Image (cartoon, rainbow, N blue to C red):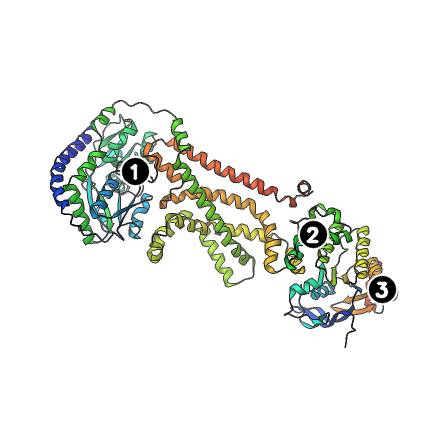
Amino acid sequence: MHPEPDTVLSIRNLSRLYKDFIALDRISLDVKRGEKVVVLGPSGSGKSTLIRCLNRIESHDSGSLHINGQPITARTDLTRLRALVGLVFQDYNLFPHLCVLDNCTLAPRLVRKMPRAQAEALAMRFLQQVNIAGQAGKYPIQLSGGQQQRVAIARALCMQPEIMLFDEPTAALDPEAVSGVATIMNDLAAQGITTLCVTHEMRFARHVADRIVFMDQGQIMEITPPEQFFTNPQTTRARDFLNQMIG
Amino acid sequence: MTSLMARFRRLCAARIAVAALACMLAGGNLARADTPRLPGFIHDGTLTVCTNPTLPPMTFVNGTDMKAVDGIDMDIAHALAAYWHVTLAITTMDFTGLFPSLAAGRCGLVASGIIQLPQRERNFDAVAYQDTALVIVARAGTRPLGGMAELSGRKVAVQAGTSYSARLAQENAALVAAGHAPMIIQQYPTEEEVVQQVLIGRAFALASQDVELAYRREQLHGRVGVIFTPPYPEYRHFALYIRKDAHDRALLEHAIAILRDNGQMAAIAQKWAITPDATQALGGSAPAPAFRWGTFFGALTSAAFMRGAFITLAVAVLSHLTAIIISIPMALVLNGRESLLRTGVTAYVALFRGAPTLLQLLFIWNALPQFLPFFREAWFTPFLATWLALSINESAYQVEINRAALAAIDPAQALAGDALGLSRGQVYRHVIFPQALRIALPPTINAFISLLKTTSLASVISVQELLAVTQIQVARTFEFTEYYAAALVYYLAMVFFFLLVQKRVERRFAWADQYGAGTHAS
């Protein structure tokens, strides 16, 4: 298989084991630059494990992973990989001892050795993009969940990644905040940033995704455009899943 | 008491007569300037004399300068050094540390008003230099005793670690054998505490020797008197102690004989013996004021107390900083996976948290040099030994504080750092440690305050920290309340200062407080 030239992410037969439990079972997927891929599936289907393998917060046991044509292995420089692939956590995991601005500037200053003034200018740009610049001086504990999520996104963007991974970004948000995150993702795609997002929020998935990846028991069951997935899923498992989620 | 003094004066008068004669003869001898042969306990031209300066007039701090040890023993030490043409170095320490230090080679000679006893001579060589007698002393007006048996069932105070306590125990065995109740023997670390027990009426009598009591009378305003002098033939001489060496012993005996012959011993005895005027003053016992404010404020503002407080502070701060630095990697190991290293750290914590701090201090100072000669050298000062002992001891406590604080940080924080591309070190330095610090700070300050007070143990190995200074001043003046109060003021001032620091630092952790944070951020 030869991935197309604008393929940013290429996954082949990727597997991940926890002792005798197969978390990922021969996953294969190509993602194009600027594409928005939403991964759906029941709990324990391996969605989070998959995206965590993409920046090696977890490591795969077999198969191959290429980003921008470069193989990702145990020898990969993690600092460079993670500058390329940003990750936003479900629980945001902001640093509580740093104000919003410092949360955003920490990694650019430490990892990219950026002077403070430059890092702050960069951070303010991304904080404005996610519409939270007014809170730059506050500490995470003073912000609502939706605000914290936006700070977490800005923090990841400050490393100027080419790929952004979202691990259930909407799980703890109210509907208004969910649509805010969707807007941000569309913005990112417009800037050429590729996004992979794990979610349980069907409306969000349908609104954001270019393609839906449906997973079950560590395997990809189907990859389809959202309209088709939500109206006419190809697999019985997907149909059952949708019935459960909607019904 | 009067007979005692008479004996003293007789002794001195006789010595002076001999001395005058001897001086003339000795002058001729010295003129020949033949350098005497040096004993083996003199190293590099220095005679190191160890003493516990709480026994006037034998050895004590005669003023507020803590370094100026004075007394008969010190005068003899100076005379010996002059005779051998060597430098004199005086090391002060707790009484119980004297013989271990001599054995460890830290002292060449111990001169500390110690009785010559056969059981001591089994391990060390002794050379007598001053006559004395063991006496039983009680409050003025107490009826004199007919014999030791009359002390049956009474409380008798005695200085710990001295031969008197052993001798009294022997007396008790005889009392019990004869069907009497034994004496209740109370042991105190310093002589002035022993006297104080009698003064405040807690003990009926005390056992000590006549030389000190004669000197102490001035301070005591005639409030105590000798009620019995037991016929112990073995308690007759103060002796200088050295490590066992027949050759050295002969040289020391010879040197003392020379000092005796040339009149120096007599001059020293004359200098320290009570004058007839002082004996006269014994009759009138002016009651001491309840609290001498002058003494109290004098102590508060004295250089000795400030220096003592500074040493206390320095020992505590250095030890705790060291403890924190060594306990951080240990805490990380303890929070990590099962390994041989983790077992080792667990054992370290168990050992040093389990053993009493005082025991650790004594072990490092007295026992360590016995199998590691490296620690016998001059660079290993009591201050360093205390720093070492307290750092190790404190680290065993601090590691638990650090471990708990690190374990309290959500593992997702490290994950978030990883995801941003931070290195392991950066994650600890910028993400985990600042958050753990907030949790660890209050118990750490608590532990530090506790440590600040634990430093007083260092007086045992001759570190002149605040409590050691206090005790030496009390030994000199008998003004317990005033010096204790001054020490208390110093300790409280230091503790309150650190509590204030804690409050200030906690204000910097406003990020953890939803409402407080608003005032900090703007």
Labelled pair 2, 1 in contact (Cβ < 8 Å) = no
The single residue placed furthest to the bottom in the displayed view is: A1
Task: Give the SS element for disc 3.
Answer: helix
Please name whichever residue, B240 or B132, is drawn nearer the observer in this view of the structure: B240
For disc 1, the marked residue is B60
Q: CA distance from mark 2 to mark 1?
A: 67 Å
The image quadrant that residue B431 belongs to is: bottom right
Is residue B233 found left or right of A45 in the rendered image? left
Q: Give the vertical position of B378 relative to B62 (above or below).
A: below
Q: Amino acid at mark 2?
A: Glu
Task: Give the SS element for disc 2.
Answer: helix
The image quadrant that residue B206 belongs to is: top left
| On-image quarter of the C terminus of chain A | bottom right
Q: Amino acid at mark 3?
A: Pro
Q: Chain of mark 3?
A: A
| On-image quarter of the N terminus of chain A | bottom right
